[in-house]
């Protein structure tokens, strides 16, 4: 426990009474020092108690006020005067100034040596150090429990009890809970942290000390060594210091590393399972059993599809898992394929990715996985910046030029490009791919030839043959539109998979 001015007064063996400064009774006394100089602040600092026989206290009222102001400015905890010694007879000016500033002034009986006060502080420090060592032992007992997989929330609660402090784990940048099941940083501490950061103007010490504006309570903020983007805020309490906080941070860092390794394992196994399902390398019954092991349910699961235009931030998958989102994820070309427990998680996924997301109908059973992928692609084709989340069942309400169903997509693709696909199959040509590349490059002969690595005359020949086979001209805006929509419909229908 912290040793305070109040503890000195309440210790009957020290025979000390309070002259003035009731507001300062809770001030912590870290050390007590005798000084008889006119300016004791050259030798004393924050948390020190000044003990004096009164030799250095001036007799003149104005000088007494200045003497006290210097002590307050140096953040000295209090002033202890030996009774009936050498202090001025009139201390009214000093006491008046102390009363106005809430600074404690004590009077100690003549028979009490100052060394007794110092010894009491030392004994209190020894007791506090003993309690702190016991706290360290409790912290590492909690670490052992953490290795049993009790979870971050339970571990944080145990550690808080171990060190007699309230602990909050949060994202360093957003000041949001590090995991979805953790306590939110109280608004008063959030504001104190932001205010302290602004004061430091970008400099980040190992431990950031924050003061609440409403209560003047102190807290310490430390970034975890294993997770720089994660910080812990600990209210100081009566036991916690930098050394003890370092032990707490180390234990939590180990648990987060263990959790991250487990998440990476889950992501890898989920990706492999989803790939097995999509490539139909696993029997339906076995697939359902494995899905139930990972997701817990299959009937209401949905497939979600996204094509991020920009590179996603490092660790975005772990951030979703920390928000307690259960999913399987497979990266395939430029597509991100998710299998979600239900459509309820879709909005969180979409906001995290920052790009449109297409959702299928409910999976029902693993045998429908290919069909749900096509449904998600159709939904994604109807998505836009204005409508970033589209469900397959409501996709027809946007982009009316695209098909409204998988059957319509398959029929449109076959009606327009069927002859070209058959020709490619029979003659082993790649006219369909040539057409796609030509339209993707906005009918640029040079860019298309470079992409396909062919001579321009070869490309001209291929385009003329495509026009003959399909019966449509690539000089006609209407025909180009029809061909492009047919290609998109083929993508949606999963042609070529």
Image (tube, rainbow, N blue to C red):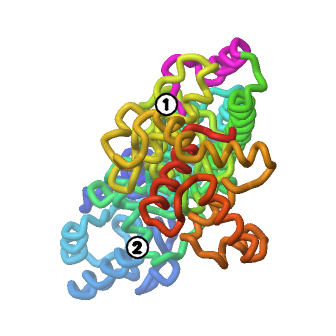
- The mark closer to the camera, 2 or 1, is 1
Image x and y of residue 439, in percent: 57, 64
- Residue that label 2 marks: 198
| Residue 164 visible somewhere in the drawing | no
How far across and down, in percent of the image, does residue 7 sit?
41, 48
> Which residue is at a point 35% across and 39% down the rendered structure image?
396
Instruction: Determine the secondary structure under disc 1.
Output: helix
In which quadrant of the rendered view does residue 437 lie? bottom right
Q: Nearer the viewer, residue 362 or 99?
A: 362
Mark closest to the chain's N terminus, 2 or 1: 2
- Could you classify mark 2 by the number of other residues whose Cα lies within 10 Å: few (under 14), some (14-19), or many (20 or more)? few
Q: Residue at x 42, y 31 (%)?
A: 344
Left or right: 381 as drawn, with respect to 96: right
How many numbered callouts? 2
Q: Are marks 2 and 1 in contact (CB under 8 Å)?
A: no
- Of helix, strand and loop, which one carries label 2? helix
Specify whether residue 458 is painted magenta: no
> Over which residues does the magenta segment extend?
284-303
Quarter-of-image position of residue 54? bottom left
In percent of width and height, residue 496 lies at 68, 41
For mark 1, what is the residue? 407
Q: Nearer the viewer, residue 402 or 102?
A: 402
Furthest toward the top, the residue is 285
Q: Is residue 438 visible?
A: yes
- From this viewpoint, which residue is outermost toward the right? 428
Q: Nearer the viewer, residue 428 or 254?
A: 428
The image's mark for residue 381 is none
Which residue is painted at 67% across and 45% down in the image?
Answer: 421
Determine the CA span between mark 2 and mark 1: 59 Å
Verify whether residue 288 appears in magenta. yes
């Amino acid at each position: 426990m912290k040793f305070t001015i109040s503890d000195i007064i309440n210790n009957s063996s020290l025979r000390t009474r309070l002259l003035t400064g009731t507001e300062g009774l809770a001030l912590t006394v870290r050390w007590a020092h005798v000084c008889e100089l006119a300016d004791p602040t050259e030798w004393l600092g924050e948390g020190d108690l000044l003990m004096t026989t009164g030799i250095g206290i001036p007799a003149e009222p104005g000088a007494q006020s200045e003497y006290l102001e210097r002590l307050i400015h140096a953040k000295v905890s209090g002033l202890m005067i030996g009774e009936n010694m050498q202090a001025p007879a009139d201390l009214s000016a000093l006491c008046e100034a102390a009363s106005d500033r809430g600074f404690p002034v004590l009077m100690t009986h003549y028979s009490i040596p100052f060394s007794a006060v110092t010894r009491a502080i030392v004994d209190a420090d020894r007791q506090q150090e003993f309690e702190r060592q016991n706290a360290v032992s409790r912290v590492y007992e909690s670490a052992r429990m953490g290795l049993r997989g009790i979870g971050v929330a339970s571990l944080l609660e145990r550690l808080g009890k171990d060190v007699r402090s309230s602990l909050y784990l949060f994202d360093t940048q957003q000041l949001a809970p590090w995991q979805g099941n953790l306590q939110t940083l109280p608004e008063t501490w959030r504001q104190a942290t932001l205010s302290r950061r602004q004061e430091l103007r970008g400099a980040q010490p190992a431990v950031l000390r924050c003061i609440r504006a409403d209560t003047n309570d102190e807290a310490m903020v430390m970034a975890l060594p294993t997770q720089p983007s994660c910080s812990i805020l600990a209210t100081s309490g009566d036991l916690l210091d930098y050394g003890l906080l370092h032990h707490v941070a180390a234990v939590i860092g180990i648990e987060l590393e263990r959790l991250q390794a487990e998440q990476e394992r889950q992501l890898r196994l989920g990706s492999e399972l989803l790939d097995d399902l999509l490539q139909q390398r696993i029997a339906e019954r076995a697939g359902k059993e494995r899905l139930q092991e990972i997701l817990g349910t299959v009937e209401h699961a949905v497939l979600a599809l996204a094509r991020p235009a920009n590179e996603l931030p490092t660790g975005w998958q772990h951030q979703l898992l920390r928000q307690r989102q259960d999913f399987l994820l497979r990266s395939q070309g430029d597509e991100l394929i998710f299998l979600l427990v239900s459509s309820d998680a879709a909005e969180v996924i979409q906001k995290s990715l920052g790009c449109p997301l297409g959702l299928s109908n409910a999976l029902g059973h693993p045998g429908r996985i290919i069909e749900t992928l096509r449904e998600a692609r159709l939904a994604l084709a109807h998505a836009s910046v204005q409508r970033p989340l589209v469900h397959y069942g409501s996709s027809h309400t946007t982009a009316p030029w695209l098909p409204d169903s998988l059957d319509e997509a398959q029929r449109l693709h076959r009606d327009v490009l069927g002859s070209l696909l058959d020709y490619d199959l029979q003659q082993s040509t790649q006219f369909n791919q040539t057409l796609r590349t030509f339209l993707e490059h906005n009918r640029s002969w040079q860019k298309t030839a470079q992409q396909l690595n062919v001579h321009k005359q070869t490309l001209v020949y291929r385009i003329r043959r495509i026009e003959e086979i399909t019966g449509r001209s690539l000089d006609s805006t209407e025909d180009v539109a029809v061909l492009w929509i047919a290609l998109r419909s083929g993508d949606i229908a999963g042609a070529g998979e």
